[in-house]
Amino acid sequence: MKIIGYIIQKEFRQIFRNKGMLPIIFILPILQLLILSNAATYEVKNINFAYIDQDYTSTSRALVEKFNASTYFNVLADFPANKNAGSAMLAGEVDVVLEIPNNFERNLITEKSGELSIIINAIDGAAAGVESGYINQIVQNFNQEVRLNIMQRSEKGIQPVQVQAIPSFWYNITLDYKTFMVPGILVLLVTMITLFLSGMNIVREKEIGTLEQINVTPIGKGQFIIGKLFPFWVIGMGLLTIGLILAKIIFNTPMLGSLLLLYAYTSVYILVILGMGLFISNFTDTQQQAMFIAWFFVVIFILMSGLFTPIESMPKWAQIITEFNPIKYFVEIVRMVLLKGSGLKDIFPQLWKTVLYAILMNGLAVWSYKKTN
């Protein structure tokens, strides 16, 4: 234990002696949490909306007013022709064009039906899908109002029956995307900082020549790895603490579950990431190589973790691969504990897999460290 203690002291002194590393560890994660949590959103707002009204009736104006009242659309202008609207969309000035045909109101009254033409810029397919959902919701609400008005005019004295669905939103009552994204961004920061620092650690010892001096000492491989891991494990837990404080104070993120349980799981998860970083470090000769390999894996893990896209929407083969993704489990646990108030029984399936992962990665890190006397 005394040898491990000396290695830990050396690591902490080496970390805090490097003035360039301190901002990377403590300041950049805070800035990233503040920026990414506000920028990473699934909502689509400020949609530039144009319309071509060929009917010029109270009904067509009422439909346009529905879009104008929405907080998602910026109603720009009434284009005189479809060609002008197409040119505006080509120039990137318009995202959605609504065309109201001639005799729109008359068809609604006489034939009880009407048609609308909607053109959506679908270069960004995900955004176009969201915009289509907004438009359909507005048109359906408008359609319901028009039908009720027509029924009341044509069949006086008969009160139309209305069916109203009242949704109940659990775990995120206000539907605030930050409630969903902030825990995920927190996972991202803890993962990236600890992986990059541990990945470059042994490589830096190689570059400055101190690793050869350590190799000729009687320090065991296990002692050396533990001494290397512990300082970054402490830093990872510190980043989690800072992130939770900011999430509560700035974003008012709900914290319904046990923070002690979250810290317990995180302590195991960080061991997985540190073991992975040290394993990479053992097979690289420069910090640039270690950074590149670590970045390669962390990008794949993050994109397949369910942080930005639902795992259920991925192909079946990709869903199978995510079962070997430790970041996926951390994202699930943080959201379950903070937003749902889940307990140990609820997170146990992810916990035991993470424990196995930690044993495997740190075992590989110890095995792959080549110590020569």
Image: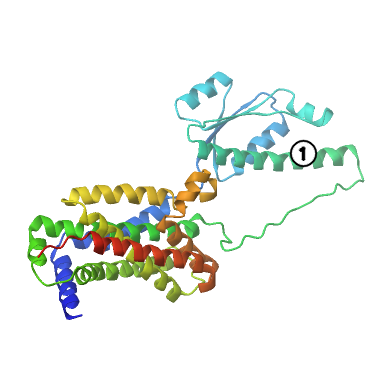
Picture quarter containing residue 231?
bottom left
Give the residue at x 50% y 69%: 348
Camera-side residue of 268 and 118: 268
Please identify the quarter of the rendering in which residue 262 is found. bottom left
Q: Is residue 163 above or below residue 351?
A: above
Q: Which residue is mark 1?
A: 146
Count of numbered labels shown in the rendering: 1
Q: Residue furthest bottom?
A: 2
Toward the viewer: 169 or 71?
A: 169
Q: Whole-percent x and y of residue 276?
A: 30, 58
What residue type is disc 1 on? Val
42 left or right, relative to 249: right
Quadrant for the C terminus, please: bottom left
**Toward which corner of the image does residue 80 lie, by quadrant?**
top right
Residue at the (28%, 51%) spot, across then down? 294
**Secondary structure of residue under mark 1:** helix
Residue 308 visible in rendering: no
Q: How is the image coloured?
A: rainbow
**Taking 38 as reference, is 341 above or below it?**
below
Other residues around mark 1 within 10 Å, as few (<14) / some (14–19) / many (≥20): some
Q: Is residue 266 visible?
A: yes
Q: Is residue 277 left or right of residue 311?
A: left
Q: Does residue 101 sit above or below 200 in this rendering?
A: above
Q: Position of residue 321 (x, y in %)?
A: 45, 49
Comparing 129 with 117, the one in front is 129
The quarter of the image holding the N terminus is: bottom left
User: Horizontally, is 307 left or right of 72 in the view?
Assistant: left
Q: Residue at x 80, y 39 (%)?
A: 147
Percent x, y of residue 330: 43, 62
Closest to the observer: 128 or 211? 211
